[in-house]
Image (cartoon, helix red, strand yellow):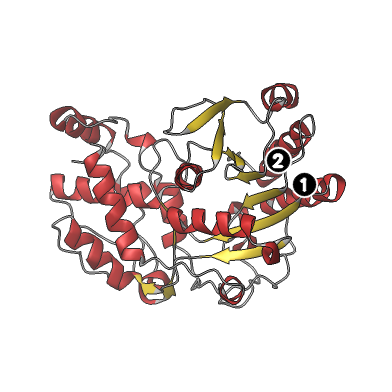
Amino acid sequence: MTKTALVVGASGIVGSATARLLVDQGWSVHGLARRATQQAGVSPVGADLQDATATKTALADLNVDAVFITTWLRQDSEAENIRVNAAMVRNLLDGLRAGARPRHVALVTGLKHYLGPFEAYGKGVLPQTPFREEQARLNVENFYYAQEDEVFAAAARDGFTWSVHRPHTVIGKAVGNAMNMGTTLAVYATLCRELGRPFRFPGSAVQWNGLTDMTDARQLAQHLLWAAETPAAANQAFNIVDGDVFRWSWMWARIADWFGLEPAPFDGSVLTLAEQMADDTGVWRDIAARDGLAEPDLARLASPWHTDADLGRPVEVVTDMSKSRRMGFPAYQATDDAFFDLFRELRAERIIP
């Protein structure tokens, strides 16, 4: 019997990768987004999750086995992040009650579970690395915690199982995404090559020299599907990363080489991408016009603020995923290959030249 999934945030980095994997695995897939988009094999569902009535109407005829929540909306404060994003999860799960209840709900959050929200990111007393799932919540308000609590409450009420997935920075393709390091670095490298600008690491000495890891969107999609289909994974929270570790001093040279650049020497000082790319909107528009690129709006491709937040952290961030390994999750992804696969896809689709 064909299983049916609802992917929430289907046009984003994680949602699009998850929808694609589910289609490939023979699932019937519905993709929910504020502005429904066309994806191969995916039935679009348009709904604004901030509107409880409209969400209930959009979901009324759906009968799904699994729900994958891969979206959130950034607000100006953590209090607003909590209010808006908790309400979105609540409206979604309340709306699904009108039809058959899902068997499983998966929620994607991230390492801000351990590092704190944007307003207190990487500050104060943090858990010891590598981060492990059993470490307690921080004593600070966090919209990830509010989202989790909505899932837990609905599961207790409606009887579905749940899983929470905590990736590190996600590598994958989506245009208009607010948190997109891979495409941001591809655009930055392209601008450096175009302008003869040094390809300079924008972050901290801790990130340059320390160990870190990342999460390919395809790896995360496999993890979501594994948890939905593995009974032992029910009602568990999991870290999910590629499975390798690296230092940015090594990865930066790998990325530079892919774009035909020499990496600039790193002197330990921070020069953010937000500063370096502040005046590049017109330059990118000219490059796009000259080379026939698909997206001339730099702001829809690059998210310097997010990349700066990750690469400027004052603490080493490494993630333990032994819990998933012990329970049988086998997948591995080399992170440099994840970057290179993304860069090839961006070039093939004329997003970068």
> Earlier along the polypeptide chain: callout 1 or callout 2?
2
Residue 145 place in picture, x, y as percent: 72, 54
Mark 2: secondary structure: helix
Image point 72% across, 59% down: which residue? 140
Residue 89: mark in rendering: 2
Amino acid carrying label 1: it is Glu
CB-based contact (under 8 Å), mark 1 and mark 2: yes
Q: CA distance from mark 1 to mark 2?
A: 6 Å
Residue 248 place in picture, x, y as percent: 34, 69
152 on left or right of 42: right
Q: Quadrant of residue 232?
A: bottom right
Q: Which residue is mark 1?
A: 150
The residue lying furthest to the right in this view is 157
Residue nearest the viewer, comparing 63 with 89: 63
Amino acid carrying label 2: it is Val
Q: Quadrant of residue 95?
A: top right
Q: Quadrant of residue 115?
A: bottom right
Mark 1: secondary structure: helix
Image point 67% across, 43% down: which residue? 65
Q: Residues within 10 Å of mark 1 (few under 14, many from 20)?
A: some
Residue nearest the viewer, comparing 147 with 15: 15
